[in-house]
Structure formats: structure tokens, C-alpha cells
Amino acid sequence: MRNSGAGWAMSAAGAMLLVACAEAPVAPTPNRDVLATYGPCGVELMTKVGAPSAPIDDVALSTGVPIRGMTIHATYSGATFGLPFSLVQAMNFGPRTDFGFLSCLAAPGESFDVAESDLETDRLPPPEGVDPTWWNSLSPREQRVLLKWADAIMKQFPGAYRSPGAVISELFKGQIEQLKTKAKLRALDLLPDPGQAELLAGGIYGCLLYQRYSRDPNAPFSNAEVLELASSLTGAFGEAQFARRPLTGLRFGRNGVFGAGLASADGFGTDCGWLVFRSIGGAILVTDPYEGGANQPSGSNGEDR
């Protein structure tokens, strides 16, 4: 693994960005059509004047045509797990998303901004050499994340792989499914409540992704790139799992970011289950925002499937 400090400039939606720590939230970039920015519970930092786009029905959502949806950019303080930079993650949801509790989802040192964005909902054809059954089991967002990383690797190391499909098959296919399963099973080992275990699994998945790709001599990633990869894949998985319960998806994705951050600060290869479990109530949150309020402990009823 390379340990360069720069990292690649990835353009995949939902990629985690590393930014210098600051007292104020990171300002939205000019291309974001930001509707509102939220800090800790009850604090609305900024609201755009004007009404959001008109709702789009479920038929439009299934056509595969880019539609106007909602993107949440979440900024997290890396100081929670000892990193000298903040982390920014983006997750995408449908146009009729209810973010009623969003202002109470942020812990101290965190903020969210809500932006309109174009969502691509169609599945992509399997790249050459990639198992179609496995490829079609991924969400459209996961497919796009993997293609972005595969293309970046091909450009960074021309001639090392014969195609983006070869990168995906060799570096991602077997590992991703194995780590998803391991994260879910390990979370259930540690928490009896299935809803809380599901959110814990987000943190374990991010941790496992970081450990897997930071140790792989065949994966040409710097530490910053592994953090970005773990955030992108956890966020994409969370979007698919919680399409109808976006705040739970945001918490799942948040745990993935922090799980990867905990792994990057660990340095000892500690079991991800214990590493993440020990951080519940701090870096890791397992309360469901839809059960008793954003910061009330409880479990999920699983109806988001």
C-alpha cells in the first residue's frame, strides 16, 4: 500500500473528503443547490430562500432516468478518533425524502447540509469479466462507486490491469460480499437488538474495509484513499438498505466513516467488532432516529426493507 499524503481526487458521488479542521462547518461548494444547513439539535445554520422541487412519483423513480433528488453532505470532526482532519460524506436519497429530524441527528462537532442533485437510478451492465449475478446484486450507487475506483486505478497504473472489470473482480468482488456478511454477523454477536446491531454493522463494515485495503499490497491506496473508499462503499450500502428511512441510512453511513477512522487510528489490527463496539455512545451511535427521536436509544423494526 502506498502512504502518500495527497490521495486521488475522486469524483464519485458520496466520496468522503478530508478537510482541515475548522471551528465552522465546511462551506458548501458552489455547485451545490443547498436548501439548508443544520448543526446540533435545534440549530439551523443556513436556509436557502425558495421552495424545493416538486415531488416525483415512484414510477419516475423506477425509470432509470436521472431525477432531481436530495444529497446530504455531512461533516464530522476527526478529533473524535484522533485524526487531525474533518471528514465529509455525501449520501443521496429520493425527492420525497423526509428529513424532519435531521437537525437533531448531528452530534457536537457535526453538521449537515441538504442539497438538490441529479440521481442516477438505473443499474449498469456488468463490466467485462465481472460475474453478472454478483454485479446485479449491488445497488446502482455501489456499481458506480466501484467503476469510479476501477477507472482511477486504471489511469494511475496503466497496463497493470487489462480492464476496469479486472480491477473489480480482483480487488473488490470477493472482499466486499465477505465483509458485508462478517459485519452483520459480528454485530449480532455483540448486540441482541437487531436494529441496533444493524447500525453497529455499519461501523464494523467501515472498519473492515479500512483494514482489508490498508493491508493489501496489491491495492495501490494511500491511507486517505482507503478512508475515502470505505466511506463511499458504506454510504452506498446504507442508501440501498435504508432508501425509505434516510436518517437511519445516514447514521449507518456515519458509523461506517467513524469505523474506518477508528481502524486508521488503531494501528494494532484490533478486531473490528470490539473496536467499534467499545466506541458506542461516542464515535459510534446505534440509536434509530425514527424510534423516539434522533438521540433516543431504541431499535429498528426493519420496515425499511
Image (cartoon, rainbow, N blue to C red):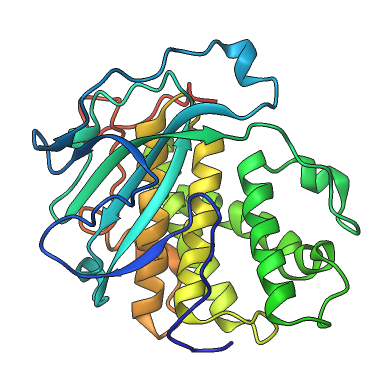
The answer to which of 302 and 25 lies nearer the viewer is 25
Q: Position of residue 142 (x, y in %)?
A: 63, 48
Image location (x, y in percent) of residue 12: 56, 55
Residue 296 seen: no
273 on left or right of 43: right
Please give the name of the residue rendered at 28% of the width and 41% of the height, measured from the top-left corner: 113
Q: Is residue 3 above or below residue 242?
A: below
Q: Residue at x 46, y 50 (%)?
A: 201
In this rendering, position of residue 78 left or right of residue 234: left
In the image: residue 227, left or right of residue 169: left
Identify the residue shown where x is 59% and y is 87%. 1
Q: Nearer the viewer, residue 101 or 93?
A: 93
Judge whether 19 appears above or below 144 on screen. Answer: below
- Residue at the outermost front position: 30
Q: Is residue 42 left or right of residue 83?
A: left
Q: Quadrant of residue 41?
A: top left
Residue 171's place in the image compared with 218, above or below, is: above
Instruction: Give the image location of residue 106, x and y in percent.
Output: 20, 44
Dividing the picture into quadrants, the one containing residue 11 is bottom right
